Image: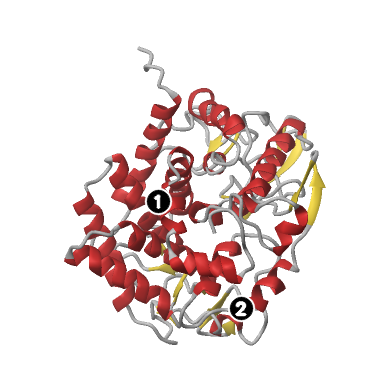
Amino acid sequence: MNSPILTVDAELEKLQRETFGYFLHETNPANGLVIDKTAENWPSSIAATGLGLACYPVAVERGFVSRAEAVQRTLTALRFFWNSPQGPELDATGYHGFYYHFLDMQSGRRARQSELSTVDSAFLLAGALTAGMYFGDDTPDEREIRNLADELYRRVDWQWAQDGGETVTHGWMPESGFLPYRWEGYDEALLLYTLGLGSPTHPLPESSYSAWTSTYKWEHRYGHDYLYAGPLFTHQLSHVWIDFRGIKDAYMGDKGIDYFENSRRATYVQQQYAIDNPLGFKDYGSCCWGITASEGPGPVTMKIDGIERRFFDYLGRGVPYGPDDGTLSPWALVASLPFAPEIVLDSIHHCIHQARLTEFNSYGFKASFNPSHPGLPGNPYGWWVSPWHYGINQGPIVLMIENHRTGLLWQLMRSCPYIALGLRRAGFSGGWL
């Protein structure tokens, strides 16, 4: 019996609801931590937890959970982060207001010898601030949400994370100190710098932002002039929270566009790359694209249709310079929905109905698939599909569908004084600012 054909809006809401199930069922109710990946004995990711916090308001508005349940889930997470140990010890949860990339799902302590991550902490803080903006009722619980979100944000020492330099470091390790890498080139650090500049306690200097933008690369590819970043997620994640339509910093003012238009162009570059398909991978086309940081079927080298192919595992795949091994990520399509619905909606429909990428899955789309790799014998698709879901993929699906439909996240964060101040200190003006 054929399933009834849904309207576009109903199909998007169904995908939202199924995807939100990840945060309902893959969260520890005792501490609010969200698992990074649905594999056995896997740790929590603070970025996934931050995305979960941002998803609860959407879930309340859509009727996926009650407001009371969302309040309790949010409070549990914020209380955990506020009360968990901060310090230089090897098994702390955080330090200087930042948090370790991976935390043990049960104890909440540092896991996998991970780094104290500046950008993942930014995603966590953005989720907390979203909760603080949404839960505005005059009740003890909702007042506590607002207070905790504010205190968590104020505690972060952004200047410490510069390690004496102009730009912000990627992170810090208790065993060896600051990582040798700094945020350079256009990427998801746009959110990090906005939050760091807006801090009322330990703000980044305005010079740190111009030092970062001085590392940008402007390119012309597939008929589009745009600010280059290879993986598609780098054009999306900051936009989950910040509405960049009509506001410009000095760099974009000089180019005559805003960051939203830049992401629209990057989305079209991705689609055109798949249409051109320079490496000849199977099934690439106008409705089958989306190259980003993702898991893949490797590491392995195989001969496919007479061509030796090298497949990678988890990697920051990108366009147009690669790496590209035929692995595509449907979540990255969905996260482009606000920028280019005219091409993304058809692609989502293709992934659901032609590629059947929501079948046999618990939480909507699986993380990634590769039609050029045969996968394990007997798999129901006939090609490789990731066996896992990842929290950092699930959140943008829920949130960017909502921004496309109602702009909820953008509206909430426009009213956040720290976001507005951070953008102004970065030199943004115009539009809603």
| Residue that label 2 marks | 179
Tell me, what colour scheme is on the image?
A: secondary structure
Near mark 1 (Cα within 10 A), the count class, few <14, some 14-19 or many ≥20, is: some
Q: Is residue 97 visible?
A: yes
Provide residue 123's location: percent of width, then percent of height. 47, 63
Q: Is residue 358 above or below residue 71?
A: above
Q: Of the residues shown, which amino acid type is indicated by label 2?
A: Leu
Seen from the viewer's position, the closer of residues 156 and 255 is 255
Q: CA distance from mark 2 to mark 1?
A: 28 Å
| Residue that label 1 marks | 38
Q: Residue at x 71, y 57 (%)?
A: 252
Q: Is residue 216 above or below residue 65?
A: below
Q: Is residue 40 visible?
A: no
Provide residue 417's location: percent of width, then percent of height. 45, 67
Q: Is residue 427 above or below residue 37?
A: below
Q: Residue at x 49, y 40 (%)?
A: 404
Query: Total marks drawn?
Result: 2
Seen from the viewer's position, the closer of residues 325 and 275 is 275
**Residue ranking furthest to the top:** 1
